Amino acid sequence: MKAQTITLVGSGLAGPLLAIELKKRGFDVRLYERRPDMRKVRMSAGKSINLALSTRGIHALRAAGAWEEMRKIIIPMRGRMMHSVTGELSFMPYGKDETEVINSISRAELNIALMNAAEERGVAIHFNQRCTGYDHRTGAVRLRDEETGKTATVKSEVVIGTDGAASAIRAAMLHAPRFNYAQSYLEYGYKELTIPAGPKGEHQIETNALHIWPRGSFMLIALPNIDGTFACILFLPFEGANSFAELDTDAKVGAFFEKQFPDARRLMPQLIENYNANPVGAMVTIKCAPWQQEGKALLLGDAAHAIVPFFGQGLNCAFEDCTVLLELLDRMGPEWRRLFAEFERARKANTDAIADMAIENFVEMRDKVADPRFLFRKKAELALEAKYPGTFVPKYAMVTFHRVPYAVARERGRIQDRMLTELCDGIERVEDLDWKKAEELVRRELIPLREV
Ligand SMILES: Cc1cc2nc3c(=O)[nH]c(=O)nc-3n(C[C@H](O)[C@H](O)[C@H](O)COP(=O)(O)OP(=O)(O)OC[C@H]3O[C@@H](n4cnc5c(N)ncnc54)[C@H](O)[C@@H]3O)c2cc1C
């Protein structure tokens, strides 16, 4: 029997991973990507960012047989290293022990490794093919060759939009009756910068950490690369005090870094060149529904639910979409309409939850990580986790090191937050926690995570 054809639009991170898995299941998979092949053409700005890969993403990579390859290009980060203005360092572990780490990976390297793996398994990737429209009545995807300007249409049984936050497939769905759509931009932008490697190719600051320079209304972060460099991201408001708009001369950029991030500044000899070369990116949350049209087209990953990057979950969530879709496919078979509806039912509340938690985490990273009260609560949280392992699990850990549904993590996180407020009020040392009260609260409010 002829294999069903599936067209995937967008060969970013979710596209090639899903292609590998669909190919494995016998479908004829075609992947169309608007950019040139990044293995042949110099990387454009915006692609040198590093991402934090964690449990949900790793699970999907393992299932696809691609994790061992990725292990060669990751650097585990054990916690956040905070840099004060005067250069003092303080370290806050992400998890309870060495097994709970997040992994720094270059977006470009990951993308390349996934595309290589997809091609090795027989997936054809067509580059420079921008999707310009989709017609669900005919199933036709319209494409324009970015080099020659030639247009074409391709038809297939199923189309999946893995074309990211600015999805063309989603844009086509906007015309469908009763399609819900909301987008909300942060008033903050981001810019990529670099800390080069030291003279012997070594990291110039602690390798196994995500570095943060939190400054209240703005921040700088740095993630390690395997070549000894750090990929940095500067987050500033677009307008107003300490904003991108304010830093409109080289002198102002230099002075701003000297004042706010003096220890990082000393390690960034190319700061001004980097600053001028790289654009300011915007960050958006997108929620929409339905994600499918009559079992013929589906949105997945950022195309269905773009989120801001502050929980380090966009990629992990997009990969988890693949896991859930494939589990349903294996269970239900290619009854696409029912399958897509079930997929959306299983995922929507969870992707909405991580979108909201990512916004909340923005405030935490920028503002609270330098607050002694917040740091004390974090210590108390770890003490409670040690006492009630598997039951009192910090929200960050549930999202990052477990695969419980995001909506459950958010709900349990809220309950635990209230418990922490009750237990930490009026005390300043973990030794003074009222363990009898803690026992009562835990027994009353939480069941073990594995029973969820
Ligand atoms: C600054 C920043 C930091 C981040 N940090 C993290 C992190 O630490 N951890 C994490 O998990 N996530 C992070 N993310 C989020 C993560 O990058 C995304 O969630 C993830 O890339 C989504 O994967 P995707 O495949 O859905 O979309 P993308 O990776 O964006 O891929 C979409 C692909 O579709 C192509 N495309 C777009 N339009 C068309 C078209 N019309 N025709 C054909 N092709 C098209 C694009 O060129 C691209 O290749 C971060 C994002 C940003 C911006």
Image (cartoon, rainbow, N blue to C red):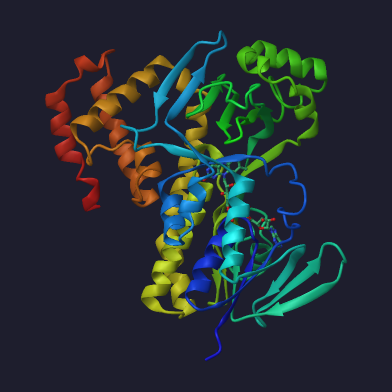
Instruction: Tell me which residue sits at (15%, 39%) in the image.
Output: 444
Please say if 85 is above or below 43. Answer: above
Q: Of all residues shown, which one is farthest toward the right?
A: 148
The location of residue 114, given as percent across then percent down, is: 57, 57
Q: Using the image as rendered, state which of residue 450 and residue 138 is in the foreground.
A: 450
Q: Of all residues shown, which one is farthest toward the front?
A: 200
Which quadrant would residue 121 be assigned to in this image? bottom right
The location of residue 400, given as percent across then percent down, is: 40, 42
Q: Of all residues shown, which one is farthest toward the top?
A: 86
The location of residue 298, given as percent across then percent down, is: 56, 69
Please say if 323 is above or below 43. Answer: below
Instruction: Tell me which residue sits at (51%, 23%) in the image.
Output: 206
Q: Using the image as rendered, state which of residue 202 and residue 375 is in the foreground.
A: 202
Q: Using the image as rendered, state which of residue 357 and residue 146 is in the foreground.
A: 146
Taking 360 as reference, is 244 left or right? right
Please say if 369 is above or below 163. Answer: above
Taking 195 as reference, is 426 left or right? left
Q: Is residue 439 in sight in this rendering?
A: yes
